[in-house]
Amino acid sequence: MVGNIPGGCVEGEVYELSREVMAERTPRLARYGISDDAALAVGVTCGGTTEVFIEPVDAQTYPELPGLLERLCAGTRVALATVLEHPRPEAVGAHLVVTADDDLGGTGSPADDARIRTEVRTLLRQGDSGLVRIPSVRDAGEIRLFVNSLVPSPRMLVFGANDFAAALAQQARLLGHRTTVCDARPVFTTSDRFPGADEVVVAG
């Protein structure tokens, strides 16, 4: 197991659910709220609600993954929409990988997928992620999705290998920028002096 979710409160429960999902190969959405007995049992006493979507990931359950990775490696702005709730249980866990020009995957309903792509591209243009709800065209009920917009990090170029540049590079990393420090003096322009920079370039 790697990482945590709300800081340690529900990890044990999520770990056990994850093992069940791996065995059953069926996605599951778990909710923990302050009023739930299950939440109190795992230590969520600080209020609010935590939702965790657990899904198996392999070539059969996630055929869109290679296409998603290919677009990410190419630096393409891409959004991943994952179906959390659907009138048809077999559609839960379906994925749509959406860029400005193309898409992969779907829910099995072309009409619903067209609506989803429209909503997803709106979020992608803004670089936003979040929950989306749309009424299903094919089925009676609502489709609930989580859209994760994956956009390249903004680039910051810092000229001058000084202490100010080192501090700026550290802050830029915290803000999610890809930072390059450039200076013509090789003795000052080293990666050891700028651990916060993604790239250090010696150039005049």
Image (tube, rainbow, N blue to C red):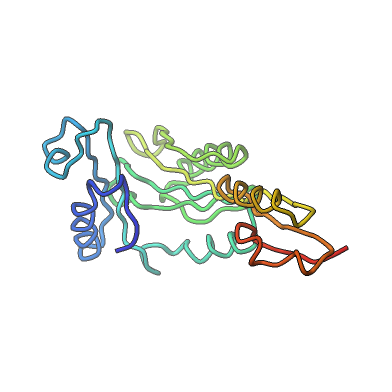
Which residue appears at 29% of the width and 39% of the height? 50
* Number of disc labels: 0
The quadrant in which the N terminus is found is bottom left
The quadrant in which the C terminus is found is bottom right
Location of residue 69 in the rendering, given as x and y in whole percent from the top left corner: 53, 63
Is residue 200 depicted above or below 4 in this figure?
below
**Is 176 in front, or is 161?**
161
For residue 193, side relative to residue 30 (left or right) = right
Location of residue 88 in the rendering, given as x and y in whole percent from the top left corner: 30, 45
Which residue appears at 21% of the width and 62% of the height? 19
Location of residue 142 in the rendering, given as x and y in whole percent from the top left corner: 35, 34
**Is 63 in front, or is 140?**
63
Which residue appears at 43% of the width and 46% of the height? 109
Image-quadrant location for residue 130 = top left
**Is 169 in front, or is 61?**
169
**Is 77 in front, or is 155?**
155
Which residue appears at 64% of the width and 62% of the height? 74
- Give the farthest residue toward the right: 204
Location of residue 123 in the rendering, given as x and y in whole percent from the top left corner: 55, 38
For residue 188, side relative to residue 128 (left or right) = right
